[in-house]
Amino acid sequence: MFELLKEQPADKILMLMQAFREDPREQKIDLGVGVYKDAEGRTPIMRAIKTAEKQLWETETTKSYTGLAGDVGFADAMFGLLMGDAVPRNCVAAAATPGGTGAVRQGFDMIRMADREARVFVSDPSWPNHITMLKHLEMHMQPYRYFDSETRAVDFAGMMEDLADARVGDVVLLHGCCHNPTGANLNLSQWQEVIDLLVKNGVTPMIDIAYQGFGDGLDEDAAGLRMVVSQMPEVLVAASCSKNFGVYRERTGLLMAVAQDPVRQKANQGMLNHLNRQNFSFPPDHGARLVTMVLDDPALRADWEEEVREIREGVLGLREQLAAELQRLTGSDRFGFIAQHRGMFSRLGATPEQVEAMRQSHGVYMVGDSRINVAGLNAKTVPVLAEAMVAAGV
Ligand code: PMP
């Protein structure tokens, strides 16, 4: 029967990682995969996570199953981190999932269970997995304009025009912060305009937040999300701990369904448990437990917040250095957007040919749509990228 299966296209980012590994040049620069790297190119285990891991090793007494929704302590801690006091805890159903990907996937599944005809509006561009998962689930997807390739900022007028088509029963997927792949984000007054539109047309928002703390700060990056949950009757939130806790391979994420009252919350909790049971049964616990320990212990939390700040400021510093270097080389301000973008990514706006030229001439690897992972740079490689960009005519 296997011969009936169609070959699936290879993942572009994984292909890029492979090509990078095979490139013999020593000076090559990997700006492809979306993983944080320090100045030495390492993806470290965060200090607080390492300490929690040692404590857990001493104190953990069982590896028996947790609950279907994972450990309630994890949901409580993540609720606090994401929502602050924007909404009452007893209106929020939550289930741990294998990473943020698992949370997005379970969220899509929940939408499909509610209404097979629901359309999911997805920013153009978006994280490619959003699109492939919707296709895989045979759901209706509707792209909305998001990125202005001239200014490299959000095409807000285009976005609002396209979102005006969404109706009751439709879902609008929004990135909570640090938009992947563009790095261009809504400001708070734009968030408010989006909320007003969705409220007016009875549209349900779903927020994917995978980089809280990497943009402007932990609370600042959740500000849009908190506005949404405090003003809208129903919201889905898919959160990833992979990046901001550095627990990529532990597969740690959370799906939350925000409702208006505890009765609906209970029904939603049952649905999230059901979906976990059908898809993988109990979610992974190790990463979730470490995250909970870090968030619940004041000293570990302070150290984690400090390390997130160091990461954020490091990336911002690289952005500023790159924008300044390009300004120096070109005498123009047109690359100022790099310092305005937030999070690990920026879309440079280069053509596929220019992306290829930068790879050939300077060994700079980035995704074909010219998304760079700024954290893949360091003070020494910023000038190389700037030179490659200028040489390729970006
Ligand atoms: N959403 C977005 C927008 C992302 O960029 C990512 C990570 N690439 C995720 C979700 C999920 O990541 P993970 O499954 O590794 O937690």
Image (cartoon, helix red, strand yellow):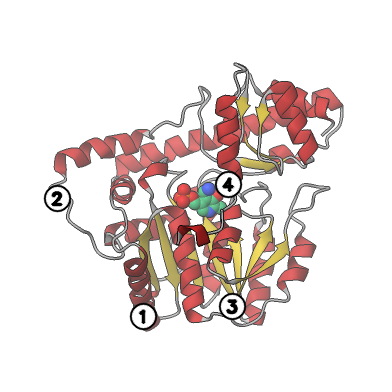
Q: Is residue 370 above or below residue 23?
A: below
Residue at horizontal 66 percent and vertical 74 percent from the top = 196
Residue type for callout 2 = Thr
Q: Position of residue 148 (x, y in %)?
A: 79, 53
- In the rendered structure, which disc, 3 or 1, sits on the residue that comes first in sequence? 3
Give the number of callouts: 4
Q: Position of residue 190 (x, y in %)?
A: 69, 62
> Residues under labels 4 and 3: Cα distance?
28 Å
In the drawing, what numbered circle is on residue 267?
1
Residue type for callout 4 = Ala
- Which residue, given by chain and number where applicable, does mark 4 sit on? 10
Q: Is residue 285 left or right of residue 181?
A: left
- In the rendered structure, which disc, 4 or 2, sits on the residue that comes first in sequence? 4
Residues at circles 4 and 3 in contact by the CB criterion of under 8 Å: no
- Which residue, given by chain and number where applicable, does mark 2 sit on? 62
Residues at circles 2 and 1 in contact by the CB criterion of under 8 Å: no
Front one among 108 and 182 = 108
> Residues under labels 1 and 4: Cα distance?
39 Å
Q: Is residue 149 left or right of residue 240?
A: right
> Residues under labels 2 and 3: Cα distance?
42 Å
Q: Secondary structure at mark 2?
A: loop
- Which residue, given by chain and number where applicable, does mark 3 sit on? 118
Q: Secondary structure at mark 4?
A: loop
Label 4 near ligand 1 (CB < 8 Å) = no
Residues at circles 3 and 1 in contact by the CB criterion of under 8 Å: no
Q: Secondary structure at mark 3?
A: loop
Label 1 near ligand 1 (CB < 8 Å) = no
